[in-house]
Image (tube, rainbow, N blue to C red):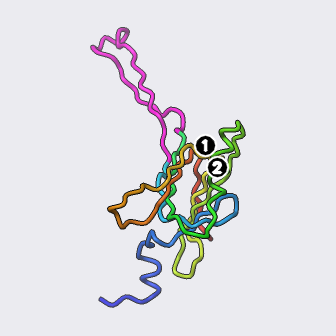
Amino acid sequence: MALTKDQIKTNYPLPVYNYRVDIDNTSISFSEVSGLELSFSQITYKESYATSGKSGPNVMIMPGQKQPTTISLKKGFVKGVSIKALYDWINGIELNRVDKKDITVHLLDETGSTVVSWKCIDAFPTKLTAPTFDAKSDEVAVESMELVAGRVTMEEAS
């Protein structure tokens, strides 16, 4: 069953390795991005059947408030590439200055064009983890940053 290039382009899922991350319109390379999700708390409401003659409570489950989104970004430590901006961003919180930024993750096609993007609005860092150092390991040095965003939107490119 031979498929044409156009059939593959329209019917096959895109690979997840081809993406770009923008923090306030500045592209930064990350090796992994996770946590792009929307979730709502649940409210359980119970009321009695006392007036209807039925036994037991009437249980209703309803959606509650939207939960904040926690995004995790991982980046390899590369000599000569400045990551000072990430350190300065989280250190600003220590000085009681919360600098909220918009984070956009673009899923790209084979030409490098955005197919779909997720925008994390009003994100700020909550944790920055330095690489794990182990003299017996041959792994690369990877640091990670966790962010909390108030809202996540998704947009398909036209």
Counting residues from the N terminus, which is met first, the one under dot 2 or under dot 1? 2
Q: Assign a secondary structure to mark 2.
A: strand
Under tag 1, what secondary structure? loop
Q: Quadrant of the C terminus?
A: bottom right
Q: At 43% from the left edge and 66% from the top edge, which residue is drawn?
A: 140
Instruction: Residue 139: name its quadrant.
Output: bottom left
Q: Report the amino acid beneath label 1.
A: Gly
Judge from the rendering whether residue 18 lies leftward or rightward of residue 24; answer left or right.
Answer: left
Question: Which residue does the numbered mark 1 point to in the structure image?
Answer: 150
Q: Residue furthest front?
A: 135
Horizontally, residue 31 falls left or right of residue 91, namely left
Above or below 121: residue 46: above
What residue is pinned by disc 2? 121
**Residue neighbourhood size for the residue with mark 2, other residues' Cα within 10 Å, grouped as few (<14), some (14–19), many (≥20):** some
**The magenta stretch spans which residues?**
38-67
Residue at (67% x, 51% y) in the render? 88
Residue 63: x and y, percent? 48, 34
Q: Is residue 28 magenta?
A: no
Q: Residue furthest top?
A: 50
Residue 93 drawn at (x, y percent): 66, 40
Q: Nearer the viewer, residue 25 or 155?
A: 25
Cβ–Cβ below 8 Å for labels 2 and 1?
A: yes
Query: Given the image, on which type of amino acid does mark 2 rest?
Result: Ile
Q: Is residue 50 above or below residue 90?
A: above
Depth check, front residue: 82 or 27: 82
Mark 1 nearby-residue class (10 Å; few <14, some 14–19, many ≥20): some
Q: Would you identify the image quadrant in which residue 154 lies?
A: bottom right
Magenta stretch: includes residue 60: yes
Q: Which mark is drawn over residue 34?
A: none
Residue 27 image offset from top left, x and y in percent: 64, 66
Residue 55 appears in which quarter of the rendering? top left
Front-most of residues 15 and 76: 76
